[in-house]
Amino acid sequence: MLIIDSHCHVGKGDGLSGPWDTNASFSKYIEWADDYQISKTVFFSVFHSNYAIANLNVARIVSLNPNRFYGFACINAINDANRVFSLIKIAVQKYHFCGIKVHRYDSRISREICEAARYFSLPVLYDIMGEVSQVYMLSQEYPEVNFIIPHLGTFSDDWKVQKSFIAPLTFCQNIFTDFSGVKRFDLLKESIERAGTNKILFGSDGPWLHPGVELEKIFALNLKEKDLRQILSENFLQLIKNVKYIEYNINRIGKTNHLLQEQD
């Protein structure tokens, strides 16, 4: 069965305040993914002060094995204001990326980002850090854009936030989620029962969370095979099927012989 990890960090940041803006080990993640037969992975950068640089670095890693790796472009709505479209255009046309990653730790999502996502038909992985009310506005203002809200709405162990997020996940057609980092198994079950397996993607939040551990949470739900296939790969493939690639020449990315060693 095809397994796609739709949520994984890679590369080096320049913040040096914690793993999230310093280093995400490529080799450690790949070892774990191989152990659990995870066939494909979506990579995006750790936090960085310049996502033009960070996205290029991710593109180089994706280019090592483009049949196995996907790339999402990280965007900071404040720092990248007035250049979002150009950054996304480069990411799609030159790097063959198939999504956008936004995190409220950097800044809240903007219309500029949503409109670029709509133009290129890209899904947006947006960590709202618990701001569930914004999900309704995003869904209503941009019904053509698919939003993946990870961690059932928050990485924090906040039952109230995750519980409240199940409502927009259920009723907003363009809202999706992953279960990475979610501790409360009853909420995983409730999400499936209310929203359905077509709204859930497998994502690990690797390499800091073990992809095998996150995968076992999905298996523990004891789903039918067709529902399991949806979560493990089909939902993600559905979200990226209409991406507007224009030009793609992987040789423009530029590989380096020492790239793997540089990631650890």
Image (tube, helix red, strand yellow):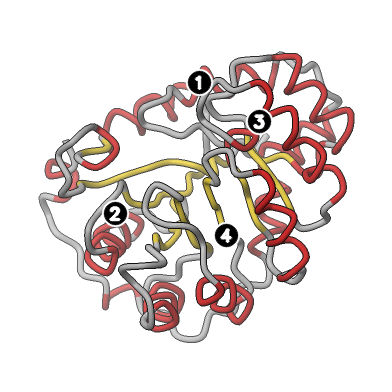
Badge 2 or badge 1: first in the primary sequence? 2
Residue at the disc numbered 3: 161
Determine the CA span between mark 1 and mark 3. Answer: 25 Å
Q: Which of marks 4 and 3 is in front?
A: 3
* Residue 203 locus on image (x, y percent): 56, 36
Which of 100/236 is in front? 100
* Residue 53 locus on image (x, y percent): 22, 65
* Residue 261 locus on image (x, y percent): 13, 41
Badge 1 or badge 3: first in the primary sequence? 3
Badge 4 or badge 2: first in the primary sequence? 2
Residue 124: mark: 4
Residue at the disc numbered 2: 61
Q: Name the residue type under label 2.
A: Ile
- Circles 2 and 1, Cβ within 8 Å, touching? The answer is no
Residue 212: mark: 1
Determine the CA span between mark 2 and mark 3. Answer: 35 Å
Q: Residue at x 62, y 46 (%)?
A: 149
